[in-house]
Each structure stands twice: as structure tokens, then as C-alpha cells.
Image: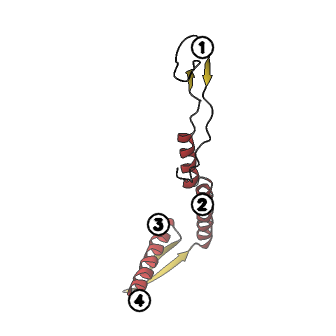
Amino acid sequence: MRNLLAFLAAAVIAFLGLGWYLGWYAVHPTMIKPGQQSYTIDIDTQKIKADVQRGVRKSGDALEDWFEKSPVDEAVKEVQQKVQPSEPAKTKVGVFPFQMGGDHEEAEQPKQKPASPWRFQ
């Protein structure tokens, strides 16, 4: 219970500090009589609405970017790039597999199926 009250107190203090910093409200002292003071609080509701809407829009855009650029998708692409070389390797092939060199043509090695990033082999 104490933790909940401490959290609520911290949230209220943070809200009051943020509101004062962003200009959501202003506190003005005024003199009523000699020795008496009164405080007036002016709350700018239009600025609060505009700031909240802007914050919701920015957080929505950030969430969309995060979902479009998922860390899992990036990891899969990275693994696929490591598994599949960009160009197939070319070697000189002789009549027999152990024969290298000579005036034989260059041939591409047969393509292998890429390993699945989700399966351990």
C-alpha cells in the first residue's frame, strides 16, 4: 500500500513539474490586504489538449516504426545474408573431381538449399 501511495505521489509531482515546464498553468500571487496574499492559478486547457494530441501522435508514429522494423525481422535478414553468399563460388573443374587446373572451363558449383534460420542442423 505504501508503494502505491509513493508511486501516486511521484506521478502527481511529475505531472505538476511537467505542466509548469510546458506552460499548462501559471500561479500568480496577488495582495488582498496588507499582510494577506492570494494566489490565482490560470490553466491553459487549449495548450494541454494540443500537447497531449501531439504526444499521442508522436508515440503512435514511434510504435508504427517499431512494428515495421521488428528486431526479429532484422535478425532473420542478418542470418539469411550470412547463409546465402551474394555470388556463387567459381572453381576450375577438371575431368575428375581431384583434377584442378588445365585449360578446362570455369564452372559454377551447384547451388545448395539455404539453411533455415529456424532449424538447427
Q: Distance between the residues labelled 2 and 1?
A: 58 Å
Q: What residue type is labelled 3?
A: Tyr
Q: Dot 2, crowdedness within 10 Å: few (<14), some or many (≥20)?
A: few
Considering only order in the chain, which callout, 2 or 4, is on the residue closer to the N terminus?
Answer: 4
Q: How far apart are marks 1 and 4 (CA)?
A: 83 Å
- Provide residue 102's location: percent of width, then percent of height: 54, 11
Considering only order in the chain, which callout, 2 or 3, is on the residue closer to the N terminus?
Answer: 3
Considering only order in the chain, which callout, 1 or 2, is on the residue closer to the N terminus?
Answer: 2
Q: Distance between the residues labelled 3 and 1?
A: 78 Å
In front: label 2 or label 1 = 1
Q: What residue type is labelled 4?
A: Met
Question: Is residue 33 shown above or below 48?
Answer: below
- Provide residue 41's location: percent of width, then percent of height: 51, 78
In front: label 1 or label 4 = 1
Q: How far apart are marks 4 and 2 (CA)?
A: 33 Å
Name the residue tied to disc 1: 104
Considering only order in the chain, which callout, 1 or 3, is on the residue closer to the N terminus?
Answer: 3
Q: Residue at x 42, y 81 (%)?
A: 9
Colour option used: secondary structure
Name the residue tied to disc 2: 63
Q: What residue type is labelled 2?
A: Leu
Q: Residue at x 62, y 22 (%)?
A: 107
Q: Which amino acid does label 1 sit on?
A: His
Q: Residue at x 54, y 50 (%)?
A: 75
Dots 2 and 1: beta carbons under 8 Å?
A: no
Q: Which residue lies furthest to the bottom in this view?
A: 1
Viewer-proximal residue, 30 or 8? 8
Considering only order in the chain, which callout, 4 or 1, is on the residue closer to the N terminus?
Answer: 4
Q: Residue 1 carries which label?
A: 4
- Provide residue 92's location: percent of width, then percent of height: 56, 19
Q: Which mark is residue 21?
A: 3
